[in-house]
Amino acid sequence: MNFEDIQTVKKLLSVPQKIVIVPHKNPDGDAIGSTLALWHFLNDMGQEATVISPNDYPKFLKWMPGNDRILNFEKENTQARDKIENATLIITLDFNHLGRIGQMQSFLEHSNATFIMIDHHQAPDDYAKVTYSDVHMSSTCEMVYNFIEFLGNTDKITAEIANCIYTGIMTDTGSFKFASTTSRTHRVVADLIDKGANNTAVHHNVYDTNSPGRLHLLGCALKNMVIINDHKTAYITLSQEELDNHQFQKGDTEGFVNYGLTLEGIIFAAIFIENKEEGIIKISLRSVGDFSVNDFARKHFDGGGHDNASGGKSELSLAETTQKFESLLKTYKELRAS
Ligand code: 5GP
Ligand code: MN
């Protein structure tokens, strides 16, 4: 954030505001962690802030301090709409265009509030008065730490804030292993631990709270994996029937896509998950190295994200979608094995 933007934010926060903080639809650890961290920070300074999530999110994120104060736009619609209508300041976190918040989009578009965006995705839209966008950042949570630092307030980072920020950095970096993890990321994390983040507890709450159904679903997903060595690609499918057979809960498939990349020689992994209710196949894509799944998702599957982690969707059937995917692979020479 440049000097001018920092001054603008300081001025905005020097007077009482009615603040709404928004993560993207289907929020992940980084989205919930960053919104709750900022919510604690703003409330602690005496501002009136509310986090509104476009929809529900997995149980393994619901232990975070302040979680019970999040409004779900789908379930608490009247209350949430009222908050948006009266907001003077709206802060959007972990997404780059308003199309990422589902039904909430038109309500934010019609708002007269001042907008601040904090995000690490490519090509941010231009809807905010202050846009703090940096694609080199490991996570929006790391940016929230920076944001607090820009305001000269790192001494105000409580254990609650530290735990929320830690969660998002941990989940968005694959537990500190992705290329986006820098020495600065580790310095931020070290400071968070000094300020009360409980790294063991956070890891346990997020990763060691599986249901038997989820582990069995993982078994099914791994069995379904198709490995295409000729194109350095592995993909997984899960049909609605398979989900139903394993008592599927929101969030159960989180992380499954990454298993493809653990195979030697595989640089591109995908998962296709049938969602009968929405009439779509939800797609997650991951890569290692230079092959941009962000470009791939944008071009072919109405999506986007980061160079090495992105998502999209398809309105074809599951079989037609994987057929389309397999034909596309042949057109990318960077995926050709030697
Ligand atoms: P995931 O595969 O874990 O759902 O998402 C990986 C990354 O891609 C995240 O940064 C997420 O925000 C982005 N992403 C996932 N689905 C979509 C989508 O449908 N559209 C866009 N633009 N980005 C997506
Ligand atoms: Mn993120």
Image (spheres, grey):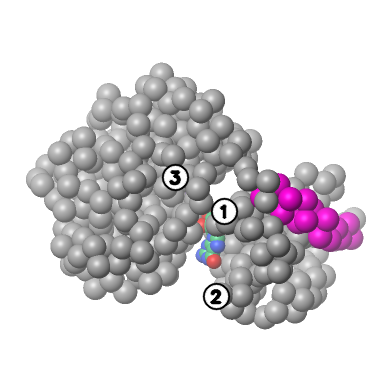
Answer with mark 2 or mark 3, whichever residue precedes in sequence. 3
Label at residue 62: 3
Q: Do residues under tags 1 and 3 come within 8 Å of each other at their CB atoms?
A: no
- Separation of residues labelled 2 and 3 (CA atoms): 24 Å
Q: SS of the residue at dot 1? A: loop
Q: CA distance from mark 1 to mark 2?
A: 16 Å
| Residue farthest along the top direction in this orientation | 194
Looking at this view, is 195 or 118 the one in front? 195
Q: Quarter holding the C terminus?
A: bottom right
Few, some or many residues within 10 Å of mark 3 (<14, 14–19, 20+) = some
| First reached walking from the N terminus: tag 1 or tag 2 | 1
> What residue does disc 1 label?
251
Front residue of 2 and 62: 62
**Residue 217 place in picture, x, y as percent:** 72, 54
Answer with the quarter of the image where residue 37 lies.
top left
Measure the alpha-carbon separation of dots 1 and 3: 12 Å
Label 2: few (<14), some (14–19) or many (≥20) C-alpha neighbours in 10 Å: few
Q: Secondary structure at mark 3?
A: loop
Classify mark 2: helix, strand or loop. Answer: loop
Dot 1 or dot 3: first in sequence order is: 3
Residue 336 painted magenta: no
Q: Which mark is residue 278?
A: 2
Instruction: Please tell me which residue is depicted at 35% across the width and 26% down the height of the picture.
Output: 159
Q: Quadrant of residue 1?
A: top left
Magenta segment: 214-233
Residue nearer the viewer, 207 or 330: 207
